[in-house]
Each structure stands twice: as structure tokens, then as C-alpha cells.
Image: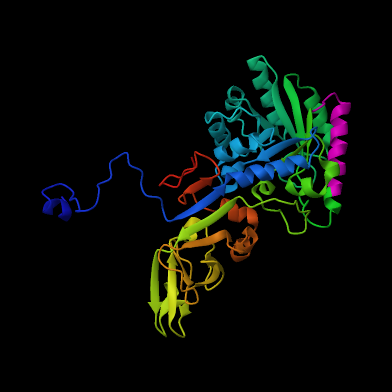
Amino acid sequence: MSTLEQESGGAWPTTAGFDVPSETRALPLRPAWVEVDLNALASNFQIIRQELPRSVRLLYVLKDEAYGQGAIQAAQVALANGVDHLAVYTLEEAIKLRESGIAAPILLLGERTPEELPWLPARDLTPCIGSVALAQQWDACAQRLGRPLPVHLKINTGMNRFGFSWRDAAQWITALARLRHLEWAGVLSHFAQSDELDKTFARLQIDRFQGVVSGLEANGIRPKTRHLCNSGGFLDLPGAHFDMVRIGLLAHGVYPSQVCRQLNGLTPVLSVKARISAVQHLEMGDSVGYGMRFVAEERRRIGVIPLGYGDGFPRVRNEGHVLVSGCRAPLVGGVAMDALMVDLTGIPTADVGSEAVLLGRQGQLEICVHDVARLKKSVSYDVLVGWRSRLPRVYLGTETARATASGRFQ
């Protein structure tokens, strides 16, 4: 029996003036969170859809919880705002969408394992196939079921990751032409570099892709949907839009590079915020944090923000800033797992409870995803998917906006 139990006669004590939470009462929201603006997401899809002819379908890639936003919420918004198809990477991601009631076509990117194939037909999931062996196994599965099964053929035109190689197309096309139980639902490839000014290699990939598609058609394989463009290709290579384009990052209001074409009105969807949890007053010579990486040369006022590298913030020292009271507050000391410290000396209105923006806009100032990527010495994609699940997601723009105390996506 614990000391508290002994002192209270074997039961946990109640503190006067405080209500004891019941088992069903929600835990208080953590004072650090990811904010997802579903209205901005909807608007972004509408802007993207307007850039395309109706004959070109729109596929939304929402792998890794829609780049950190929450896959179910993002899928619902996407399908209500011009998106025709969805795509994820793992089987688990696809099943989660189906179990939430999402009925739209779902494409599984990457390469499937043979063990995964039997799970797909009952859930109406379509795989990408990039080898003759896997295509034969999928064909055998269709034969056993007694109905054609859809497949998208992945062509390796230079990314050299997944797919049938464009170099030996004649050989594998001949093998595929012998299969009798598959529905040739699509054919795709993926740009290795579509968002830079130099489009030389991207155009070479387009030529290779078109050559393979011609070879398929000459052998009686006529895929219904051809798709090659990712966000960068959609923006800068309209001649490669074909029947469908795949949009991921761009829908979230983030450009794949700073040199690609810009769309008027596109808005970032995801922000990261927290409330200052403590304030420390330093005298000259006092240090801050592990390793004493910051030493005050004069009196300083330091705010503690309850979010750290354990949540996905870059593990930096004396570098970067957050936004507080419409001002930039520089980081001091090293970022810890659960906290980071900022200098509030020049911001007298900032205090415990003040909102700090670590990613997003406050007043006239903004910290964009590329700013955080530079701190992290990485790219925007890594920043977006790097915010851990223990940060609750708060959804704006919907009556069901909510976040769980555990921080897991709904």
C-alpha cells in the first residue's frame, strides 16, 4: 500500500475544491497541439480541381495519416471537394479508411507482398504491381475468385525504386499479355525530379512512359487510366497530366519546391501551437537547459514551451524562434525531449498561458514548413509527417473537430 493510501485509510484522498474525474470524463487537452484547418484543405482542393479539365481525374495521396493531418478527416474533405481517387502506402492505412466508411477507389502504392494479396479483393483495394511474379499471383487470385481483379502497372522510368523497367519492356509485356484474369485499371510511373527548373530528366521520363504505354497497347493491354504527375508535375508539366494526377503535399498548402509554379489562394493547412507553461528569470551568468548551452550575459526572462524533439521539433541549440504575442521569440539552450525554452525579455506581454506558434501564422508573422525544414536540415515532407501522435490533433472548420487526450488520430 502506498503512503497516500495508508494516510487515507486505503483510498486515494480527495482534495477540497477539486472534482475527482470519473472514468468517462475526458482528460484535459495537452497544452501543445497540431491544428488542422479543414476549411483551408477544402479550399486548396477546389483551387487544384479548377486547374484541371474535368476529363482529368484527381487522386489524393494521403499516406502516413495524410502527412500528419489525420487520414480519415482529410479523406472526407477531399472526396467532398473534387477528389476521385485515394492512395496510401500500407495495407493497414487502406483498411482503416474502409472501416471508417470511405468507399472511394483506393490505390495501394509501392509493391505488395504475396501475403497481402488475399486481403485486397474483399476490401475493394487496387494494388500497384511491378513484377511479373506478383502479377501472376494476382492473376491466380482473380482466377480463384472467378472475377477480374483490377491492377495498376508501375513502370520504372528512372526513379529506380519500384516497377517494371522501361528498358526490358518487350520481355515483361509479353509475359503480362498471357494473363487472362486481370483488369488493366491503370498504368503509372513517378517523377524523380519534377519540381526543379531543369525539366530535362522529367521530360525523358515522360518519353519513356509513353513508349511503354504504346508497347502495352500494341500487345492488347490497354490500361484505362494513365498517370504520371505528382504535385510538381501537376504544376509545371501540364502535357503529362494524361488521365489523372496524384496530389499530396500541394493539397496541404505546401509547395514541393520554391521554384515551381504557384497557385493563387493556396493556404497551409497544418499549424503547431503550444501554451507557455512556465517563466524563469535569469541573472547574469545563469544558464539554460542541458549542457548549459546558453549563458545569460544580463538579466533575461525565459519562457518554457511544453513541446520538444519527442514531439517532432528539431533538436537544435540556440537556433530558430517561435511566435509569441505577435513577436519572434528566439530559442535559447538546447531543445529537450518534452520542452524548449525561448527568450521573452523583449516581449513583456508574454506570460504563462500565452499561445506560441511553432509552425504557422500569428498576426503578420509566419513560420512556414520550409523554415522548420532548414532547422531540421531536411525537407518539408519530413517536417509534416514528423509531428508525433502524442500531439493531439485539433480540427477547425467542422462540427466534429476534436482531439483526444492520448493524442492519437481519430
Please state if 122 lies on the left or on the right of 258 as rendered. left
Q: Nearer the viewer, residue 355 or 222?
A: 355
1 to the left or right of 140: left
> Is the stretch drawn in magenta largely helix, strand or loop?
helix
Q: Nearer the viewer, residue 130 or 205?
A: 205
Q: Which picture quadrant has residue 220? A: top right
Q: Residue at x 39, y 73 (%)?
A: 280
Image location (x, y in percent) of residue 362: 56, 61
Q: Nearer the viewer, residue 346 or 340?
A: 346
Does the magenta run of residues contain 262?
no
* x and y, in percent, of residue 84 in the image: 69, 32
Residue 252 appears in view: yes
Question: Residue 161, relative to residue 380: is it above or below?
Answer: above
Left or right: where 289 falls relative to 225? left
Q: Residue at x 83, y 42 (%)?
A: 240
State the residue lying farthest toward the top. Answer: 146
Residue 210 colored in magenta in the image: yes
- Residue 148 found in image quarter: top right
Q: What is the span of residues highlighted in magenta in the rendered image?
A: 203-223
> Is 308 above or below relative to 252?
below
Residue at point 28% right, 45% down? 21
